[in-house]
Amino acid sequence: MAYQLLTRLGLHKYIWSSNLLSQTESSNLTEPHLEILSIGVVYPVGEIHPEDFVAFAKRHYGDSSAIRTTLKLNDASGILVRSSVFPLHEEEMNASEAPSIGRISRLFKEHGVKLAVEACKKAINEWGGSIEDITHLVAVTCTDSSNPGYHEIVARELKLKSDVDKVLLHGVGCSGGLAALRTAANVLQGAAYRSKKGRALVIATEINTSMARCALDQCKEEHRPNIAAVLFSDCASVLVLSNGVQRQEFEQPIYRILNWKQKTIPNTESEIQFNVHANGWKNVLTKDIPYIAANSVGPLFGELVRETPLDLGGQLPHPTNFDWALHPGGLAIIDGTKQALGLSSVHLAASYEVYRNYGNSSSATVISVMDRLRRIPGGKDYVVACAFGPGVSVEMALMVRSR
Amino acid sequence: MAYQLLTRLGLHKYIWSSNLLSQTESSNLTEPHLEILSIGVVYPVGEIHPEDFVAFAKRHYGDSSAIRTTLKLNDASGILVRSSVFPLHEEEMNASEAPSIGRISRLFKEHGVKLAVEACKKAINEWGGSIEDITHLVAVTCTDSSNPGYHEIVARELKLKSDVDKVLLHGVGCSGGLAALRTAANVLQGAAYRSKKGRALVIATEINTSMARCALDQCKEEHRPNIAAVLFSDCASVLVLSNGVQRQEFEQPIYRILNWKQKTIPNTESEIQFNVHANGWKNVLTKDIPYIAANSVGPLFGELVRETPLDLGGQLPHPTNFDWALHPGGLAIIDGTKQALGLSSVHLAASYEVYRNYGNSSSATVISVMDRLRRIPGGKDYVVACAFGPGVSVEMALMVRSR
């Protein structure tokens, strides 16, 4: 009650720091706060190595200037291996034509739902709570588009209660993981407003590799290289978010979410697109994206830190005093953001690691980076999660680690 | 503050009645409550009459048992006219093949976005507020699937602030209008929790008629009648939802939202589907839907009224003491629900009227019914909005009219 009262009086800023939060909480455990209680990430066991991709592309698309340049991007991607439900030698990947969007949807329901359910079970298991205590589900994907959405199938397979409040987001591409976290944060604060317990499964699932052929078709048709063909991978990432109402003793936060924001950068609508097509989604990813992305992070970060009371122990709210869970959209995006904000590779260690070892799994990636980051010893107290998507939209969440 | 305090103490139930709400509000105008401040509905001017459809179907698909039965459903639909961006004689509808999902998306971006923007302007105009005061946007569609979603294009055309909190729902079919309202209600209560002003545009847009050919193709391929071919129409419906924080004097609610819920009916996953396909979405709509829908309404209504304090002036919380904004999925659904709940045609007048004069515009329909209902003089104080979608999912919102 005390915190709520202070919020109403506009005085909460004076207690909203990582040290004082714990004091407030210990004096009133039922007080609502947004906490990430667990994270479950599942990558499929299939692997696509850059060298496998060369043979695959040549087998189906022969030699052309566009293919040659795409293979140069493949060499320079910085990705060691991409996770995939379909290794490139499998029949599914080597049919006479690229699969239709209907087939892609059936593959998603088979492989994507399986990954999502597995990641949910992992997150629920780490959280330690009961399936009956899940009150909300916020899911996202940009690689399926059926009704019912896959969130209904996941809910059924997990045997969630029939009246769990469910949401499936679409149209947000790679920024979807943080769009789902933002929506879950908003919705769970809505539950807190009514003094209702909120425990949400936030689920991001992408099966991008079923569109490997579609991406190479596009390369051939447009006589242009297509970086999408060499970046994207498959993953399901899940986190359990709590609004802190009726907190149980076993519920120990990994991160507390302090603030979040989405911003659409003006005049960038033609820079990132995944346009629906009979064979899935066709990409538009321009060369300007790394520049736009890197230059949008600083201003949004500035707005968020100005709006959020932080206890940096006398340090300035400079980007270097935070750890970064940056969506690794591509090497140029991570490197560009590092340079624009004056960061070192250490600040972005988790982003580099996830990118190198798994590739870009669109919406599912940023939660995987948050998972990697928590396992790196040391680091800063405060963490910024950031992802880019079509719009161009930039999503950001400001969090504090629980030590 | 008083209301918030009572909520925390669990005493809000004793003041949560239509009469007492006004008293509470008049004594404290800044107190947050969820209010629908305006509604804007735009149907395209194109018309599809059942008799036009006969000629159209015969022209392209000749004569077969499946087509004949589909045309019988067309005769018996009870729809006088369906609104459409494409009259059936237009070139777009009479190509050699059904349009691809890519073409359907481009048509959506042209016609759907235009309808949505127009409906937004209508709603904003009735509300009387400024575009700068829009803080949230919750959109839905099941007839487009691109990234960025159409919500980003609508936001740009309306010149919304770049940091408006945006959400696009998918995978919820015809229940999408209420899924969007539920999500907006949750999210705006989240804003209220942080004492933040919340004014959301809730937007449902569907261009179903671009899939008229796809539905008839399905009829031919599956050798089965397809009721979807004769039911669906186009529409954009928008409402402005407020969380009541910093209420302005000009902001007069049409409805106050008291409670809301979504429920997935067990073992019904194969009854309603819109499966993505190279030519749009293929329907599964079984004969059992009217039965499932009609029988799911009573129990969910029962749960909602038990959980919501109501002032019925001594009357029982029986369905007949409420007006109904029921999604008119088809004639059998409205008639079946009427019978199951013991309602008269008067209780469902708005649903019948919208269905008869415009057809089923999937997610956009229920908001249109709410709009029609407010224009019918008299009626009950309390209103139930209800819609069905794939899952089978039932969405319900309990509202009180402002007189």
Image (cartoon, coloured by chain):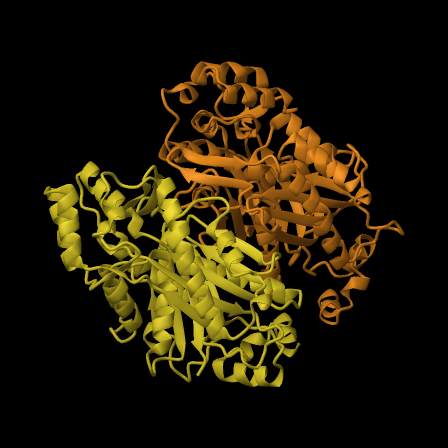
Chain colours: A orange, B yellow
> Is the residue B254 above or below the residue A44 in the image?
below
| Residue A77 percent location from the top left of the image | 63, 25
Q: Nearer the viewer, residue B303 or B238?
A: B238
| Residue A222 percent location from the top left of the image | 45, 29
Residue B391 visible to the viewer: no
Residue B319 visible to the viewer: yes
Q: Nearer the viewer, residue B128 or A224?
A: A224
* On-image quarter of the C terminus of chain B: bottom left
> Is the residue A244 above or below the residue B61 in the image?
below
Q: Nearer the viewer, residue A216 or B359?
A: A216
The extreme right residue here reads A314
**At 73% across and 47% down in the image, what residue appears?**
A298
B356 relative position to B325: left or right: left
**At 39% across and 26% down in the image, what residue appears?**
A98
| Residue B102 percent location from the top left of the image | 38, 40
| Residue B112 percent location from the top left of the image | 39, 55
A320 relative position to B220: left or right: right
Q: Nearer the viewer, residue B91 or A32?
A: B91
* On-image quarter of the N terminus of chain B: bottom right
A194 relative position to B225: left or right: right
> Is the residue B259 above or below the residue B362 in the image?
below
**At 62% across and 64% down in the image, what residue appears?**
B191
Q: Tag count in the figure?
A: 0
B355 relative position to A199: left or right: left
